[in-house]
Amino acid sequence: MTEWGVALIAAGAALLASLISGVFARSAGRRQAAAMLETVRITVEQQRQERALAARRATYLRFLDAAETVLLARRTGGSTAEDRAALQRAMGAVQLEGPAATEAGALLEALRRERGPDELERARFAFITAAREALRAAEHRTE
């Protein structure tokens, strides 16, 4: 075999090795990019679910705070239209958020009809229980 033949075989082998390693590197790069995109997608989805859960928690808290304000004002005789309007707005937000709306409605109705303290406390406790269950269920879906 001549020197040219040996040189051509060596060059061909080097070229083939480089081509094969390039194909494998490209394939590995694609897999890495796909894995990175999946990780980012999962992270973004988890963040979205966390924000939704935080918004729901804040909505339930606003309703409970507004209900407590009306309750306290009724006990002291200083209930205002502004307090009742805030309670109604908070109720609307709870209805949009979901699961605890029925119990919130029962508490709102008990406040409107000026029920006794025991019935108000039962309605308040039912709302808190329903809100906790709804938040717990939402937290389990995010895990």
Image: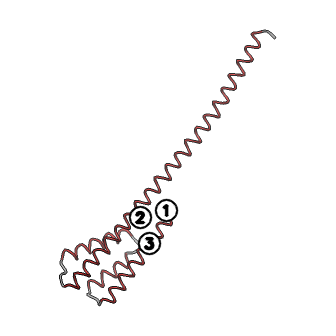
Q: Between disc 3 and disc 2, whose residue precedes?
A: 2
Residue at image mark 3: 134
| Residue 105 position by quadrant | bottom left
Which one is earlier in the sequence, the residue at label 1 or at label 2? 2
Name the disc covering residue 86, or none.
none
Relative to 68, is 96 above or below? above
Image marks 3 and 2: residues in contact by CB distance under 8 Å: no
Residue 142 relative to residue 88: left or right: right
Query: What residue did someone put label 1 on?
Result: 142
Residue that badge 2 annotates: 53
Graded by Cα atoms within 10 Å as few (under 14), some (14 to 19) or many (20 or more), the crowding at tag 1 reads few
Query: Cα distance, mark 3 to mark 2?
Result: 10 Å
Tag 2: residue type?
Leu
**Label 1 residue SS:** helix
Looking at the figure, which quarter contains the N terminus?
top right
Q: Secondary structure at mark 2?
A: helix
Q: Secondary structure at mark 3?
A: helix
Q: Position of residue 91 (x, y in %)?
A: 30, 73
**Camera-side residue of 77 and 111:** 77
Judge from the rendering whether residue 114 lies leftward or rightward of residue 23; answer left or right.
left
Q: Name the residue located 40 percent from the left edge and 74 percent from the top edge.
A: 131
